[in-house]
Amino acid sequence: EFCVRYLGTIRLIDAAKEAGVSKFVLISSILTNGRAIGQEKNPGFVITNAFGGVLDEKLVAEKYLRSSGLDYTIVRPGGLKDSAPT
């Protein structure tokens, strides 16, 4: 689990650079930077990050991508659901 969220993403970024990929798109999470914007008590942040610090790990991966030199887009979706909007 840890390797997929953090080390796995870093390995993909490195492999993309090595392969000459022109653009890297990373799907992250809406509250990934929650600590930086004072949202550590936000219920969404607390619940999501309770699973092994997943948001903190996503932030490490985002920072690695930003410093990689690759052209990139980071998408931070919120509320992904399988049901119709209400």
Image (tube, rainbow, N blue to C red):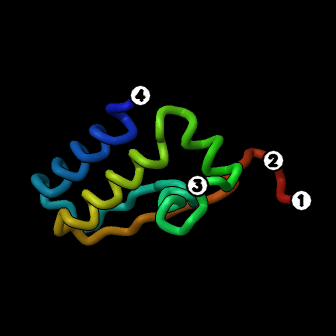
| Three-letter amino acid code at the position of disc 2 | Ser
Query: Dot 4, how many residues are within 10 Å of its Cα: few (below 14), some (14-19), or many (20+)?
Result: few
- N-term-proximal mark, 3 vs 4: 4
**Residue 25, position in %: x, y?**
38, 61
Task: Give the numbered dot on residue 83.
Answer: 2
Residue shown at 49% from the left, 56% from the top: 32
Q: Secondary structure at mark 1?
A: loop
Number of other residues with Cα within 10 Å of mark 1, as a class: few under 14, some 14 to 19, many 20 or more: few
Q: Position of residue 13 (x, y in %)?
A: 23, 52
Report if the CB atoms under discs 3 and 4 are less than 8 Å apart: no
| Residue 86 tag number | 1
Q: Nearer the viewer, residue 33 or 15?
A: 33
Q: Identify which residue is drawn at 81% across, 47% down.
A: 83
Relative to 44, is 75 on the left or the right?
left
Q: Give the answer, above or below, for where 3 lies relative to 70.
A: above
- Label 2 packing within 10 angstroms: few (<14), some (14-19), many (20+): few
Q: If the image is split into quadrants, where does the C terminus sit?
A: bottom right
Q: Earlier in the sequence, mark 1 or mark 4?
A: 4
Residues under labels 2 and 1: Cα distance? Answer: 9 Å
Secondary element type, mark 3: loop
Q: Nearer the viewer, mark 3 or mark 1?
A: 3
The span from disc 1 to disc 4 (Cα, nearest Å) is 32 Å
In the rendered image, which residue does mark 4 sit on? 1
Report the quarter where the N terminus lies.
top left
In the rendered structure, find residue 40 and report the number of the disc placed on it.
3
